[in-house]
Image (cartoon, rainbow, N blue to C red):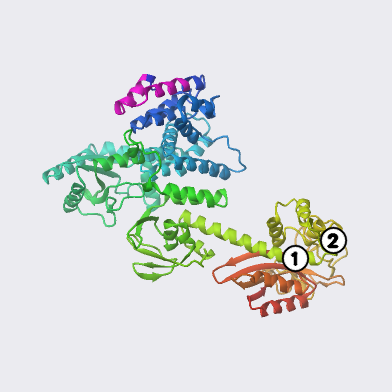
Amino acid sequence: MLRQYELVDRVLDYDPEADEALLNRAYVFSMQAHGSQKRASGDPYFSHPIEVAGILTDLRLDDETIATAILHDTIEDTVATPEEITRLFGGNVARLVDGVTKLSKIEAQTENERAAENLRKFLLAMSDDIRVLLVKLADRLHNMRTLHHIAKPEKRRRIAKETMDIYAPLAERIGMYEFMKEMQTLAFEQLEPEAYESISKRLEQLKTGGGDRIAKIASGLKLLLGRAGVEAEVTGREKHPYSIWRKMSERHISFEQLSDVMAFRAIVPTVEDCYRTLGIIHRRWPMVPGRFKDYISTPKRNGYRSLHTSVIHADNARIEIQIRTADMHAEAEFGLAAHWAYKEKKVRADSQHSWIADLVEILDTAGSPEELLEHTRMAMYQDRIFAFTPKGELIQLPKGATPIDFAYAVHTDLGDQAVGAKINGRVVPLSTVIENGDQVQVLRSKGQVPQPGWLNFAITGKALAGIRRHLRNRERDELIALGRKLYDDIVRRLPAQLGGDALDHALSRLNLGDEAALMTAIARRTISDHAVMEALMPGSAGADVGLLAPQSTAISIKGLTPGVAFDLAECCHPVPGDRIVGLRRPDAGIEVHAIDCPVLAELAERGTDETDWVDVDWGDKSDGAVARIAVQVKNEPGALGIVSTIIGAHRANIIALRLDTRDSMFHTNVIDVEVHDIHQLMRLIAALRAADAVNSVERV
């Protein structure tokens, strides 16, 4: 563990103007606050925040960030308070400490909800000051270095998976590749211990069997460049185990078949030397097709710049070579932290890291914890391509992105109003996949709204969140409109006119928050007409039936022993007048099916014993049953209201309604209606088919 003077000296070495008193106060305060607390390793707990601070001094971060690292666990794990931190160390440090606090005390019902809430608060804090992320990553890195001290394997695996899913990708997104690689390696060791051990042994065998092969190749590469007049620092290494395992998994090959396990780096003085070096290497060894990447002319979204190529070296061995300047190398190693050298002190995320702003926008639009996690991971993890606006602005997108993703990446309003696109001047469908380097123009209309079909080809978290937000709002508006129409019909059936406060009293009796909630409940049939009538005008419904759906009229079936239980089959929804047959199930009652039910045909094909069939018919009291119909209506205002009006006019009762499919032209709704008999149902279907707003009606 670093001693107090050692830690302070480290900071003063690269920042002589650092606030030495601030660092000393933080060190002493944290040591006293953590007191006799111990880590799983048996070490004093205080050693952890000091090691985190030490990691950040390697990144040459400012004094406030180092103080935050020292104090980052005090609010959660000790009796220290935010007010105390503010008083002793200032508002900036207190805000940073609060942003980094581990959030483990959040109570939620499910793991997804807990993870989503943690991520939500973390991203909001990170967007306010990127140093929160830098401290958090150093905190997680040190925790991973000491993970083996935790006794319970399931806890180690949970922490490792969280690291692999969230923290390593975050490190990659801000260009901190060394952090990312170490986190991945340590997490991989816990998640796939056998694969980790096997690959590590193979790498060790290569190292011992090949002698100084890597050193020889690096030396030869340096000599080649020197002879051509390029001064270069050349280093080489084996790729880390997780990277190798991922390539083996993706390509479905064995370790022996994996040819590019060695990677080399050439650091040269200028950008011009980068391209000269590339030409020299390609003249000397053949390039592997498809493996050249120019991240200098088109940097990654996290600002990473370098040339990547793979060549076939001696003995047909493939080697990867990265070519960059010293400045590019500093950014590649430390990413965003390289911009946070003590002299620059850029607090807020700049435009180079606009993806953070995208993540914050997703926070406001995700409809559930699952959606938040899905959209956020999409925004962080996917490989990128580059496309251009007509004005030449560079837009980075994941591979497989379409013009819808492009539109939402430019602006949410553009995505909402997209009606088409031009790629390289040619009009194309919105589902067209964008290729690297394409120029994309989004065509828009103020009358357009997001369409459900877009969910089939949008792939970015921002686009999916925007589309789903709009669809949820539109579905809610449609349900409220339908509920209003059904509510008006309920009110007309009341024995007297309602008073001015009747609706407010009804909402209170039904325990509903507002009028919109009531209309939605009526439309969804989660509340019965009788319950609404009783709430509006007590006694008007004849009995208090609560929130249960209305019960069908009693039905009797001929051909059954009196008292034998039976059910009308849900698969075919027979109604009086249908030809029916009974089916005896083992350890159950009788199921009554329509004679043409597909389920019966399947059973007949399988050769079901004839004794399972029961000859039945409708009885004298068979006055009403529930039929299911699929109604396809035009995608236009009021269409669903017309359907409900026709159903009401035919004295049928809507029991349940579910939206089945929807696109820009039509919506298909599956509706359960209570009817007296088959003749009433056929008249209803004929009336619906005659309506202009209805495209088709089928009995399900």
**Mark toward the viewer: 1 or 2:** 1
Q: What residue type is labelled 1?
A: Asp
Quick check: 387 left or right of 210?
right
Which three-letter amino acid code belongs to the residue tagged 2?
A: Ala
Q: Quadrant location of the N terminus?
A: top left
> Was residue 13 drawn as part of the magenta stretch in this picture?
yes
- What is the quadrant of residue 390 in the picture? bottom left
Residue 86 vertical position relative to residue 214 in the rendered view, above or below? above
Whole-percent x, y for residue 430 in the image: 44, 66
> Which residue is more in the foreground, 454 or 149?
454
Give the residues in magenta: 5-29
Who's the residue at 40% across and 43% down the image? Answer: 349
* N-term mark: 1 or 2: 1
- The location of residue 278, given as percent across then percent down, is 20, 50
Q: Distance between the residues labelled 1 and 2?
A: 16 Å
Judge whether 479 appears above or below 48 on screen.
Answer: below
SS majority, magenta: helix
Q: Quadrant of residue 76?
A: top right
Q: Residue at x 54, y 69 (%)?
A: 664
Residue 591 visible, this angle? no
Q: In which quarter of the image is the C terminus?
A: bottom right
Estimate how packed mark 2 is, as few (under 14), some (14 to 19) or many (20 or more) residues with alpha carbons within 10 Å. some
Name the residue carrying label 1. Answer: 488
